[in-house]
Amino acid sequence: MMDNTQRSLLSKSLLISASLVLLTGTASCGKWWKSDTRKDEKPAYKHAARKIRSHSIGLMRFEQFLTGSFSSYAQSQRDPEFYEIVLHMVPIWEDRDDGPWLYVEQAAASNAGQPYRQRVYHLEQIDKNSYSSSVYSFENPERFAGAYMDEMPLAELTPEDLSIRVGCAIVVSWDEDQRAFVGSTNGRDCQSELRGASYATSEVLLRKDRLVTWDRGYDANGEQVWGAVKGGYVFDRVLVIGGGISGLSCASMLHESGIDVRVLDRGYRIGGRCTTRRTLEGVVVSDLGAPCFDADDPVFLNEVQRWIGSGACARWDGAGDSFVGVPTMDAVVDRMAQGIDVRSGCRVDRIMRQDGMWETEVERRDGARVTERCEQVVLATHPRESARLIGEHSNMISSVLGSVETRCVWVLVMRINDPLEGLPAMVDVGDDRLVCCES
């Protein structure tokens, strides 16, 4: 709990820089009645341990800069001639030793569930300072739509399914002055029949936080027939650390504003105070977080009404004006996370400021360590966790967060096989529900 002095200090320093924002606690728009804080779980992960790679530092940097989710929202707001496009790239076949492989998905933000481009990129080193990205297509790509959010469907994709797009490889070199990879396809080598084109070209500038791509198609006379005219598409992203109610509320609002966002959460499943325990087979065991919540804020109440309309929420039939998730509390969590790139099992160990960017060191559930890079980071974690991550950037705020007192709540979860008889403390109200009576 924060006292008034702590709140004042924190409010005056909420924005650590132009691009690191701190949220602590749950969303302020409602009350989420807290149960015991969930412990870190270490379930069996669905992938075997990856082999240790022997790629060069430059090739690993090339892969890291490409990996992630990007959006051209900011550019589309500045210039209506550019559409709002979302782009996702995730590693696949990580046990191979012939260079990194990426699954790529690109779509209009207004129709994100139906990508218009799905490819596989194979990254290789050419010489000390040059790298190539070979481009592959595959049949029936629609069956993998949205697979960047869940690696399981991609397990069905094999190298034998791929067809190389001859002449369409992009060759880049590291530009130290720009701190970026810069390159393009080679002349007219990449054949294309799209919209009457004879060939296509691609130009790329790749930084830690930003990807600029300029794809154009030309007819046999060298006249442009498709693609942007003014310049390339500019893709940016925002990173939210913490997949509880605060983090998902923030991510949901960003997403609905058209901003591409990724959420990292260290738990086996997102939710925070809306945790529903399941077995590894997905069978619901119990809600371990908030059994219900209030909606005091009118804006939040409007959002709750939308959840009710979607079937994810309902009014609680007990005392008070409260709400519950349907059929379990994490239905609300799933509703908030719709369309958002959410990664569970990702523990953020450190946040660093490097070359004007934020770099987050992340340990994944399978033990692999990766680095996320972006211009904007939102912290939406427990005060102690935020204090740890923010310590090297602001001692004052770290001290305030570290002094916040938290109180535990013990929760008893029971499974009762036999009917309750002669127990006045509990009343069986049907539908496998029990009501606890005051005693």
Image: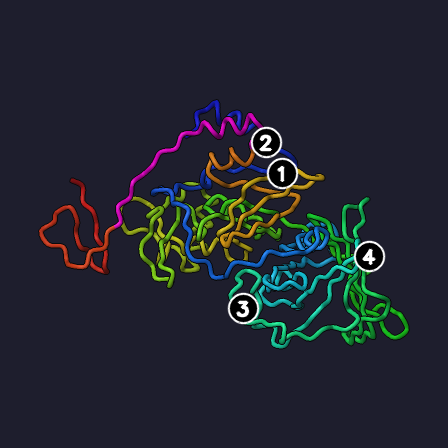
**Left or right, 314 with reference to 112:** left
Q: Which image quarter: residue 115?
A: bottom right
> Mark 3 or mark 4, which has the lower sequence index?
3
Task: Give the labeled residue for mark 1.
Answer: 352
- Tag count in the figure? 4
Say whether residue 154 is magenta. Answer: no
Q: Which residue: 53% across, 54% down?
A: 342
Q: Which residue: 44% across, 60% down?
A: 310
Task: Give the labeled residue for mark 3.
Answer: 155
The CA distance from mark 3 to mark 4 is 39 Å
Q: Position of residue 278 (x, y in %)?
A: 36, 57
> Mark 2 or mark 4, which has the lower sequence index?
4
Tell me which segment is drawn in magenta. Answer: 391-413
The CA distance from mark 1 to mark 4 is 35 Å
Q: Position of residue 381 (x, y in %)?
A: 49, 40
Q: Position of residue 426 (x, y in %)?
A: 17, 49
The overriding secondary structure of the stretch rendered in magenta is loop
Local crowd size for mark 2, using a 10 Å CA cut-off: few (<14), some (14–19), many (≥20): few
- Out of 243 and 123, give the one closest to the viewer: 123
**Left or right, 141 with reference to 430:** right
The answer to whether the residues at label 2 and label 4 have Cβ atoms under 8 Å apart is: no
Local crowd size for mark 3, using a 10 Å CA cut-off: few (<14), some (14–19), many (≥20): few
Check disc 1 and give the amino acid type: Met
Mark sitting on residue 392: 2
Check disc 4 and give the amino acid type: Lys
The CA distance from mark 1 to mark 2 is 8 Å
> Mark 1 or mark 4, which has the lower sequence index?
4
Circle nearer the viewer, 1 or 4: 1
The answer to whether the residues at label 1 and label 2 have Cβ atoms under 8 Å apart is: yes
